[in-house]
Image (spheres, grey):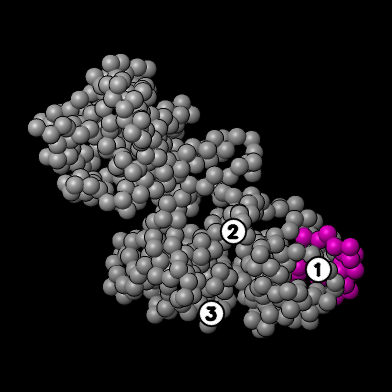
């Protein structure tokens, strides 16, 4: 009778483990296991050897120490003929398969009300060690970190020798699994620490969606996330790379406002943004800002989307909606009238305070804390004071400008954008763009500038169009020249002392 080969199976996620072990036993494997996994296997009528019987040592510290023993790791790490002779003399049997997945640390830390002690309890030690040892010795040991691979492994061991390509693939997967796991732990400790920008920044992301292409058809693209997707898709075509960027921008500006708000986003720019007494009024105002650009846009709403709102949207082509919820009637209408439209629910991380902003740069990442603050310390610096209505518009415009690419100028009337000048290399051109878009609505509007006016020319262009009040950070060496020009032109000006560049 052939000598049985040995497989060590110790898993937290026990889905499919019984069938896996049945397949291994059918291929002349002895199953060695621990704790709850061993019980599950034995309850299914499969012969199982406990790790304690292999090591001659009981599990201790409430199961914290089970597999950390020379009789286990000697059987995993032996590679050369000399190694095999040595473990033979020590009566250590070689282990040919390790199946292990880890305590659910990432799922645990996302739970409401979880304590630090409970989080630390879910940091796996023995499992990570098993995976790393087996993966290091992948030429001799098959390592299985994902239950989805069980059937492939059973099929492979039914052959005389598992293919080298499979062995290497599974090893790579195991190291990726442990690296992601350790990164999540490191990030958790960083989040609990005093530094907002830690000395070492560990990234723990998994590919959750392979996109048709990137920003352009000749580019590849994929979405990587930490944890669950913050935007649950209820219906519609798959999101594209550009859709995802626009959804992110739409939700970011939308959540700035407590009042019912609608943001209409195109190419990462708010072509329409408004608040109102309800979302119907907010939508009408936002759409009126730039109805041409609204075609093919993303619409974000910070209230439930109702059938009445969709009736207002009508036949307008919309790439996606994003909102905290949808009425049953709204979902039925979307399914019937706009079946290809992406319908997204903001949840989880989308509702939490924003985290750090990460940008890729050559050779690394550029990090900054989120531009979450928005100054409320407004100081009127001109002889003319803004009216209460203008002050409300100025505050709205200031938050809107924060989400427009620099150099940014935003014109607002009645708590709605009427003109947006974005992404210009000089500020006066941004003023001209916003004024041209606003047309007649520029007269009596207020203007927000994301950074100071370096010269009075931008202010003079706004005044010529009829802008009545301005909000800007100040801080230029020519601030007094700009203030004097505002006084001369009869414009009220507010400075915030805070800049909102966006590159």
Front-most of residues 426 and 122: 122
- Give the residues drawn in magenta, as a range: 467-492
Query: Which is closer to the viewer, label 3 or label 2?
Result: 2
Residue at the (53%, 79%) spot, across then down: 293
| Residue 242 in the figure: left or right of residue 48 | right
Residue assigned mark 2: 360
Quarter-wise, where is residue 39 in the image? top left
Front-most of residues 100 and 477: 100
Residue 235 versus residue 60 in the image, above or below:
below
Q: Position of residue 472 (x, y in %)?
A: 76, 63
- State which tag comes first along the sequence, 3 or 2: 3
Secondary structure of residue under mark 3: loop
Question: Tag on residue 293?
Answer: 3
Residue assigned mark 1: 453
Residue at the (59%, 50%) spot, across then down: 356
Q: Position of residue 106 (x, y in %)?
A: 42, 40
Asked if residue 292 is among those painted magenta in the image, a careful observer would answer: no
* Quarter of the image that includes the C terminus: bottom right
Q: Position of residue 44 (x, y in %)?
A: 12, 32
């Amino acid at each position: 009778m052939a000598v049985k080969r040995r497989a060590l199976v110790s898993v937290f996620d026990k889905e499919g483990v019984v069938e896996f072990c049945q397949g291994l036993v059918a291929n002349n494997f002895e199953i060695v296991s621990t704790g709850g996994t061993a019980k599950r296997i034995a309850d299914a009528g499969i012969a199982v050897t406990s790790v304690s019987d292999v090591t001659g040592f009981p599990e201790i510290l409430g199961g914290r120490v089970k597999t950390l023993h020379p009789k286990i790791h000697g059987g995993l790490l032996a590679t050369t003929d000399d190694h095999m002779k040595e473990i033979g003399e020590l009566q250590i049997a070689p282990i040919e398969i390790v199946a292990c997945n880890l305590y659910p640390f990432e799922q645990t830390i996302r739970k409401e009300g979880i304590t630090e002690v409970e989080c630390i309890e879910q940091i796996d030690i023995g499992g990570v060690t098993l995976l790393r040892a087996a993966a290091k010795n992948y030429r001799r040991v098959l390592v299985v970190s994902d239950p989805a691979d069980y059937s492939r492994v059973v099929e492979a061991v039914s052959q005389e020798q598992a293919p080298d390509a499979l062995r290497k693939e599974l090893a790579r997967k195991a190291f990726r699994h442990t690296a992601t796991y350790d990164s999540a732990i490191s990030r958790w400790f960083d989040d609990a620490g005093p530094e907002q920008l830690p000395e070492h920044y560990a990234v723990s992301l998994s590919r959750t969606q392979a996109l048709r292409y990137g920003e352009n058809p000749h580019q590849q693209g994929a979405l990587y996330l930490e944890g669950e997707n913050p935007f649950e898709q209820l219906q519609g075509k798959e999101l594209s790379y550009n859709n995802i960027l626009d959804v992110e921008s739409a939700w970011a500006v939308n959540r700035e406002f407590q009042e019912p708000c609608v943001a209409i986003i195109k190419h990462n720019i708010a072509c329409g943004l408004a608040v109102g007494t309800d979302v119907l009024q907010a939508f009408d105002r936002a759409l009126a800002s730039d109805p041409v650009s609204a075609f093919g846009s993303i619409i974000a709403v910070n209230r439930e989307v109702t059938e009445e709102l969709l009736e207002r949207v009508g036949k307008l082509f919309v790439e996606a909606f994003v909102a905290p919820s949808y009425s049953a009637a709204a979902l039925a209408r979307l399914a019937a009238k706009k079946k290809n439209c992406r319908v997204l629910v903001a949840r989880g991380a989308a509702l939490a305070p924003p985290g750090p902003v990460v940008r890729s740069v050559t050779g690394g990442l550029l990090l900054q804390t989120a531009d979450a603050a928005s100054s409320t310390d407004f100081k009127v610096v001109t002889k003319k004071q803004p009216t209460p209505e203008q002050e409300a518009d100025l505050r709205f415009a200031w938050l809107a400008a924060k989400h427009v690419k620099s150099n940014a100028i935003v014109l607002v009337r009645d708590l709605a954008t009427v003109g947006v000048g974005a992404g210009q290399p000089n500020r006066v051109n941004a003023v001209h763009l916003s004024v041209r878009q606003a047309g007649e609505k520029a007269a009596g509007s207020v203007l927000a500038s994301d950074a100071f006016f370096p010269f009075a020319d931008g202010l003079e262009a706004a005044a010529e169009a009829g802008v009545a009040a301005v909000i800007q950070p100040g801080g230029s060496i020519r601030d007094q020249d700009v203030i004097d020009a505002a006084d001369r032109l009869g414009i009220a000006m507010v400075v915030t002392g805070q800049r909102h560049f966006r590159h």
